[in-house]
Amino acid sequence: MKYKNYYKILGLSNDKATDEDIKNSYRKLAKLYHPDINPGDTVAAEKFKDINEAYQILGSEESKKKYDRVHFAYKLKDGLNFSNIKDAFNGENGFNEFFEMFVGKNEKNVVTNLDKKQNKNIPIPGEDIESEIEASLEEVFNGEEKKIAFKTTNGKMKTITVKIPQGIRNGGKIRIADQGKPGKNGGAQGDLYIKVNILKHEKYKLDGANLLMDLPLTPWEAALGCNIEIESIDSKVLIAVPAGIQSGEKLRIASHGYYDGYGLRGDLLAEVKIVVPKTLTKEETQLYTNLKNISCFSPRSN
């Protein structure tokens, strides 16, 4: 008898998949290969049959436990010999005997009736819907809550409170279960996916897990070096500016950036911008004149 990898059929990498992973993969594939969406497509119909068969097994805690024992043994032995069982898909009722090992021969269900008119009564998961919200860099950094209003399938407006996952990327999506379009024939309701658009910040620029900022320095701070306090997104940091630093150079403040998706922080990169005063006092004018007269430095010598 041919072994069937139900995890692979549902597009799952291994048996560590959670119940939610199994459900989501099934719903996605069932929508893609449903006979109502692919009329006359025998390949899609066969895939749809396998998908439902796989979900029938993996979606039940009892049958999944039985299957996992066979799945584990198959991985250890690189295949099992089911010579005492007839080939798959034999018998007048068309039962898949590998499938029967887990659900029982007399349990007629949606999978075993795909070739009959009853397939029109198969549950069809509802479609997902999408919406968008705008959030400040501080809101996504802290993982704050926001209210979102969206139009339901019956045309009415609905408002819900959404907690933004801390450190979500720009364009990332939040999934809200069972807020999408209703299913057919008792199928599960679709989900709501909320796209998060991070607003432009006046001070910081998001670059992956790092945050970029400008660091204005006076000519004497850049020339002589200094210790200055700057503000990161969530704290104040004292940094040492080396003497002779140039415009465009960046100072890296480790672990003071954004989140990297694994619970760690990126870096804060402060780009030096040397700024001269637009107006000078008489004393400052005299000092700059004296510096001009005594300095041999020429930035254009090369």
Image: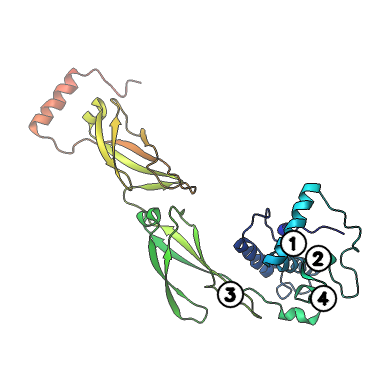
Residue 149: horizontal and vertical position, in percent?
A: 42, 72
Give the spatial CA distance, label 1 vs label 3. Answer: 29 Å
Q: Which residue corresponds to mark 2?
A: 101
Q: Give the amino acid at mark 3.
A: Gln
Q: Give the amino acid at mark 2.
A: Met
Tell whether label 3 touches label 1 (CB within 8 Å): no
Residue 167: horizontal and vertical position, in percent?
A: 44, 52
Mark 4 or 3, nearer chain start? 4
Q: In which image quadrant can residue 42 be found?
A: bottom right
Q: Residues within 10 Å of mark 2 (few under 14, many from 20)?
A: few
Mark 2 or 3, nearer chain start? 2
Q: Which residue corresponds to mark 1?
A: 66
Give the spatial CA distance, label 2 vs label 3. Answer: 30 Å
Q: Quadrant of the C terminus?
A: top left
Q: Which of marks 4 and 3 is in front?
A: 4
Q: Which residue corresponds to mark 4?
A: 106
Mark 1 or 4, nearer chain start? 1
Tell whether label 4 touches label 1 (CB within 8 Å): no
Q: Residues within 10 Å of mark 4 (few under 14, many from 20)?
A: few
Name the residue located 36 percent from the left edge and 34 percent from the top edge. 250
Q: In which quarter of the image is the N terminus?
A: bottom right
Q: Residue 127 carries which label?
A: none
Q: Give the amino acid at mark 4.
A: Asn
Residue 164: horizontal and vertical position, in percent?
A: 43, 60
Mark 2 or 4, nearer chain start? 2
Tell whether label 2 touches label 1 (CB within 8 Å): yes
Query: Is label 4 in a helix, a strand or a loop?
Result: loop
Q: Can residue 9 be seen in this view?
A: no
Is 293 drawn above or below residue 217 in the view shown? above
Q: Which residue corresponds to mark 3?
A: 189
Give the spatial CA distance, label 1 vs label 2. Answer: 9 Å
Name the residue located 73 percent from the left edge and 65 percent from the top edge. 54
